[in-house]
Image (cartoon, helix red, strand yellow):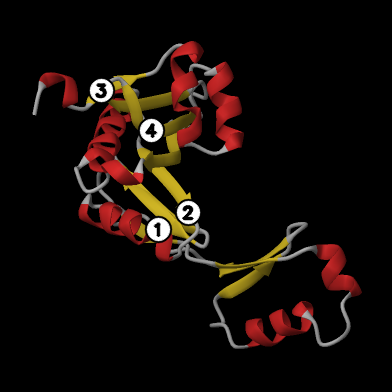
């Protein structure tokens, strides 16, 4: 492999530098890349000068002396043609190192669990992330549900939640129903900076 074909990892600190990476993340994070405030930590990887992977993190409580800073991983993506080469693992490890240098004591990552996220789940598990706060999310159009003939989704959700364990509760945002544990597991077992991820919404946690 020539030097030109080796992956190049680069922290992106200028909004202009993020432009070639826009297609590697969701539209709501493209907006953040356009501004790139100082609490954002963005790492890209390119091969032959072509962007092939991107990870986006954001630091919270950065200027609050009463609370230690924590970080969220908003997005992690590697082009399918460049997967299984360790690029995602390297992106994750390098952004962890950067966030640790910025005094973050934990990193969190949320994602919807599906067949498409199996590789992410395996990566997080291999890298020592813990999984917690698993929930069940039912997305729907509120208008269509309310106007649908009975029995409709609301009835189904009622029957579903009756069968959930007693430590689960229901939360109703505008367009989704979420069933989640009332009492998330204690984090006291973590002795150093932590990291975690979530499924459906799963939350993964990483202490640093």
Q: Assess whether mark 2 and mark 3 are in contact (beta carbons under 8 angstroms).
A: no
Label drawn at residue 54 = 4
Residue 93 as seen in the image, left or right of residue 78: left
Disc 3 on helix, strand or loop?
Answer: loop
Res 21 → quadrant: top left
Q: CA distance from mark 1 to mark 2?
A: 8 Å
Q: CA distance from mark 1 to mark 4?
A: 16 Å
Q: Is residue 56 above or below residue 79?
A: above
Res 149 → quadrant: bottom right
Disc 4 on helix, strand or loop?
Answer: strand
Residue 17 at what x, y percent from top left?
43, 14
Q: Which residue is mark 3?
A: 48
Q: CA distance from mark 4 to mark 2?
A: 16 Å
Disc 1 on helix, strand or loop?
Answer: helix
Indicate the quadrant containing the C terminus: top left, top right, bottom left or bottom right.
top left
Q: Assess whether mark 2 and mark 1 are in contact (beta carbons under 8 angstroms).
A: yes
Q: Which residue is mark 1?
A: 117
Label drawn at residue 111 = 2
Q: Earlier in the sequence, mark 1 or mark 2?
A: 2
Q: How many marks?
A: 4
Q: Earlier in the sequence, mark 4 or mark 2?
A: 4
């Amino acid at each position: 492999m020539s030097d030109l074909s080796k992956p190049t990892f680069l922290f992106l600190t200028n909004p202009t530098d993020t432009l070639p990476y826009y297609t590697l993340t969701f539209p709501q994070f493209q907006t953040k890349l356009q501004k790139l405030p100082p609490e954002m930590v963005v790492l890209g990887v390119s091969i032959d000068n072509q962007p092939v992977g991107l990870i986006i993190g954001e630091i919270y409580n950065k200027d609050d002396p009463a609370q230690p800073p924590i970080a969220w991983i908003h997005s992690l993506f590697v082009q399918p043609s460049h997967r299984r080469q360790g690029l995602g693992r390297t992106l994750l490890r390098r952004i962890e190192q950067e966030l640790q240098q910025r005094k973050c004591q934990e990193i969190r990552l949320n994602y919807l669990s599906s067949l498409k996220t199996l590789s992410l789940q395996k990566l997080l598990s291999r890298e020592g992330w813990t999984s917690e706060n698993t929930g069940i999310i039912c997305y729907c159009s509120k208008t269509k549900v309310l106007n649908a003939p009975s029995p409709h989704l609301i009835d189904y959700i009622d029957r579903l939640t009756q069968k959930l364990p007693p430590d689960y509760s229901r939360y109703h945002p505008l367009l989704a129903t979420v069933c989640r544990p009332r009492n998330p597991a204690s984090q006291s077992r973590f002795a150093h900076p932590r990291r975690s991820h979530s499924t459906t919404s799963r939350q993964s946690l990483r202490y640093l």
